[in-house]
Image (cartoon, rainbow, N blue to C red):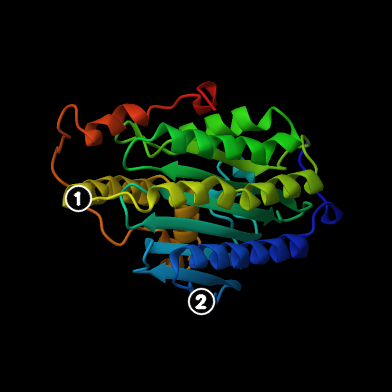
């Protein structure tokens, strides 16, 4: 049974929460870098608009974006309704905050976080709503301490809502952030969920609270890693490897990511959608890391595992 009915959700409350989250994230991350995020407000002719917040050429972040969008459309793209094909083509409302940070130092991982809310309004039926989101870590050099910390905070974000959510969303993340055409993981994962509220398993208030908790736990998950790694020395070798690995990030976002595809397929604002791409990336034909090198160690490090099974 789907969660339906005009009384079962509060879009205004979700929007206010998302705007507050974006403001808090940009304030904290701008202070961490030392350079404020610029603000670009935009409107969408088809309905809605958004606020793109961006930092480029900062001391810490070579590029980072935190985008809020609230858009409406006459036809929900199939990329946004993969698990409910009957909703494809229905009028819809979508809002969310999406954040991607590409640090300058290769020892500081790239990170992604997203929380979103959809409402589909099929003709002749009651509205159908659902939440989605998550966060994941993409390191360039293997560090188990960072991975364990990130996964521990992801678990803490979900544990108040039931013990079943973290194992389920962790596995979903491992499967989702996988570059199928390369047969390799994008990073060390985290948590990912979609279609939360599409069935009767969870009500609006609990689904909304869980989604808020994910957004609120992003900084505790990422900031300690930044503070530990930002002063680690690096040279051209590390920057070159970082650029090569960033190429994998680009491939995933343009080929596999449902959020990117939804934005492009729905006629979204391209500059805001592609803010997730790194400023510099490289591709080299059939390049292989030197055996035994720190770069080669990343391959095994990115194999999915239970990061919380090891020492705290």
Could you tell me if residue 73 is visible in this image? no
**Horizontal relation, residue 199 to residue 144: left or right:** right
61 versus 38 height, above or below: above
Q: Nearer the viewer, residue 14 or 36?
A: 36
Determine the image quadrant of residue 72: bottom right
Left or right? Give the position of 89 relative to 142: right
Q: Residue at x 40, y 38 (%)?
A: 187
Closer to the observer: label 2 or label 1? Answer: 1
- Quarter that holds the N terminus: top right
Provide the secondary structure element on which disc 1 rests.
helix
Residue 6 or residue 181, whichever sits in front: 181
- Name the residue that disc number 1 marks: 240
Dot 2: within a 10 Å radius of its alpha carbon, few (fewer than 14), some, or many (20 or more) residues? few
Residue at 42 percent of width and 32 percent of height: 144
The picture places residue 119, in percent across and down from the top left corner, at: 69, 55
Q: Position of residue 160 (x, y in %)?
A: 75, 37
According to the picture, the residue beneath numbered tag 2 turns out to be 39
Q: Nearer the viewer, residue 214 or 169?
A: 214
Which residue does the image show at 15% across and 45% down from the upper left? Answer: 284
Report the residue that reaches farthest toward the top.
309
Q: Is residue 299 left or right of residue 166?
A: left
Task: Check contact, mark 2 vs mark 1: CB within 8 A.
Answer: no
* Label 2 vs 1, first from the N-terminus: 2
- Mark 2 to mark 1 CA distance (whole Å): 31 Å
Q: Assign a secondary structure to mark 2.
A: strand
Percent position of residue 43, x then y? 55, 77
Report the front residue among 306 and 235: 235
């Amino acid at each position: 049974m789907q969660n339906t009915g005009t009384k079962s959700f509060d879009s205004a409350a979700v929007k206010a929460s998302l705007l507050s989250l974006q403001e808090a994230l940009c304030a904290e991350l701008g202070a961490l870098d030392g350079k404020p995020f610029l603000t670009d407000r935009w409107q969408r002719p088809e309905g809605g608009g958004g606020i793109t917040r961006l930092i480029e050429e900062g001391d810490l972040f070579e590029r980072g974006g935190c985008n809020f969008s609230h858009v409406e459309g006459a036809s929900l793209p199939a990329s946004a309704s993969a698990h409910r094909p009957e909703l494809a083509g229905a009028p819809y409302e979508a809002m969310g905050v999406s954040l991607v940070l590409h640090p300058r130092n290769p020892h500081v991982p790239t990170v992604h976080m997203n929380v979103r809310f959809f409402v589909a309004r099929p003709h002749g039926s009651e509205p159908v709503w659902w939440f989605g989101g998550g966060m994941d870590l993409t390191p360039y050099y293997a560090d188990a301490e960072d991975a364990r910390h990130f996964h521990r905070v992801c678990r803490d974000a979900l544990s108040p809502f039931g013990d079943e959510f973290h194992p389920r969303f962790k596995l979903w993340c491992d499967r989702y952030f996988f570059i199928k055409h390369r047969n390799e993981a994008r990073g060390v994962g985290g948590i990912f969920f979609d279609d939360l509220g599409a069935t009767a398993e969870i009500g609006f208030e609990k689904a909304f609270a869980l989604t808020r908790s994910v957004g609120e736990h992003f900084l505790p998950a990422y900031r300690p890693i930044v503070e530990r790694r930002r002063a680690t020395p690096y040279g051209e070798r590390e920057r070159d490897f970082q650029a090569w690995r960033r190429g994998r990030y680009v491939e995933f976002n343009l080929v596999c990511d449902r959020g990117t595809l939804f934005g492009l397929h729905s006629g979204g604002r391209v500059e805001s959608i592609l803010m997730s791409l790194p400023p510099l990336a490289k591709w080299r034909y059939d390049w292989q890391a030197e055996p035994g090198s720190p770069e080669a160690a990343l391959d095994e490090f990115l194999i999915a595992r239970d990061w919380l099974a090891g020492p705290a």
